[in-house]
Amino acid sequence: MTIVSDDSSWWPIINANLIGSYFVVAASVGVIYDWGLTFGQEVELIWRQRWSLMTFFYLSVRYVGIGYVVIYMLDNLLVQYNNSHSCHIMYDVVDWTGDVVNVTLGVIMITRLYAMYQRSKKVLIFLVVIFLAIRISNVVVGAISTMQISAEELVLSGTYQCMIGYAGNSVSLISMTWILGTIWEVLVLCLAVWIAVKHFRELRQHSTRGIVWDCFAVLMKTHVSYFASFLAMSCFQIGLFSPTLSADIYSLDTQVYLSFAQIFQFVQLFVLGPRLILSVREYHTELVADSDAATAMTSIAFQERVHVSTSSSV
């Protein structure tokens, strides 16, 4: 049932939601602007190259991301719901779409580490088991929290508002999913740093840098940027445990706080996520143009047949 009211006591909530919408629009425009900046590279490095699993992952993250931000932006600005059920469905669609993109990015991370560890089956099995355990736990926790979340459509002073109610321990459950996600990202970062440091030490012992050094430098640069954005977003999400923020989810301070978390999420998923693949493809293309020795880079560039050599002859 839609609630209609012109009571001035609702105005702080209207203003808070309006300010939150401005942040959503800014983050959405930023994602689309980044797509425009990198579209030329995308055509050259993705569309015109041999299609592979990584091509599918890149296109999924990039274009599902664009669809996500457009829907999210329209949801915050223009959509008028027929009832609270439609309001709840839109919330679920946005929420679970983000989870699908996170799963895709997790698979990309596993593929990168698999290549960095020279196709070690033990590393692959370890990563897949941990990843599945965390994702399955997140799905279960997410399903439970979804059942505890309610939605209500309000028409307040002529503005349409979709109010989400977090009953029971739903806020704690949502924060738990971010804690599990942070554990995964920390694990992946530690494994990437460890193997990168190991290779750097080996190359220094042989007084050489070359292709492998540069390749791992590119991988670590994109990985650290991605992790930094995820860490910032996770800190914002976990910060919802604060009694001050959780006491009134629709206060101006809480909405601004959540809006900054939304910006970091958009950057991590839809800007830095696609660049995990794009940056490596770009480096591989430059390497091919500069040297015939580029075949040593093939595994890291997701071409799927050659091991990365770490000998002094690289």
Image (cartoon, rainbow, N blue to C red):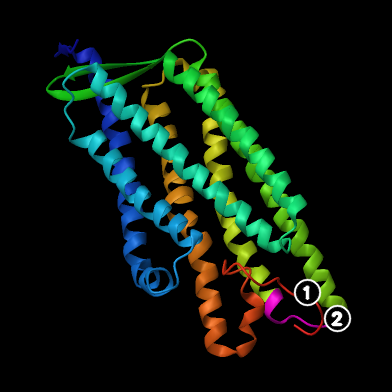
> Does residue 240 appear anywhere in the picture?
no
Q: Is residue 282 magenta?
A: no
Task: Look at 83% across and 70% down and name the residue there.
Answer: 201
Q: Residues within 10 Å of mark 2 (few under 14, many from 20)?
A: few
Q: Considering depth in this image, is 22 or 101 the residue closer to the camera?
A: 101
Residue located beneath label 2 in the image: 206
Q: Which mark is residue 180?
A: none
Task: Look at 56% across and 47% down and name the residue there.
Answer: 106
Q: Is residue 210 magenta?
A: yes
Residue located beneath label 1 in the image: 310
> Does residue 284 appear anywhere in the picture?
yes
Where is residue 135, by image quadrant?
A: top right
Residue 178 x/y as whole percent: 56, 33
Q: Considering depth in this image, is 231 or 206 the residue closer to the camera?
A: 206
Residue 78 x/y as whole percent: 17, 35
Q: Secondary structure at mark 2?
A: loop
Task: Look at 81% across and 76% down and name the residue there.
Answer: 203
Left of 242 or right of it: where is 61? left
- Quarter of the picture containing the N terminus is top left
Where 88 sits versus 40, above or below? above
Residue 124 x/y as whole percent: 70, 51
Residue 134 x/y as whole percent: 62, 34
* Distance from Cα at disc 2 to Cα at disc 1: 10 Å
Mark nearest the camera among 2 and 1 is: 1
Q: Amino acid at mark 2?
A: His
* Contact? badges 2 and 1 (CB < 8 Å): no
Mark 2 or mark 1, earlier in chain:
2
Where 309 sits versus 221, above or below? below
The magenta segment is 207-212
- Quarter of the picture containing the C terminus is bottom right
Left of 4 or right of it: where is 107? right
Left of 174 or right of it: where is 193? right
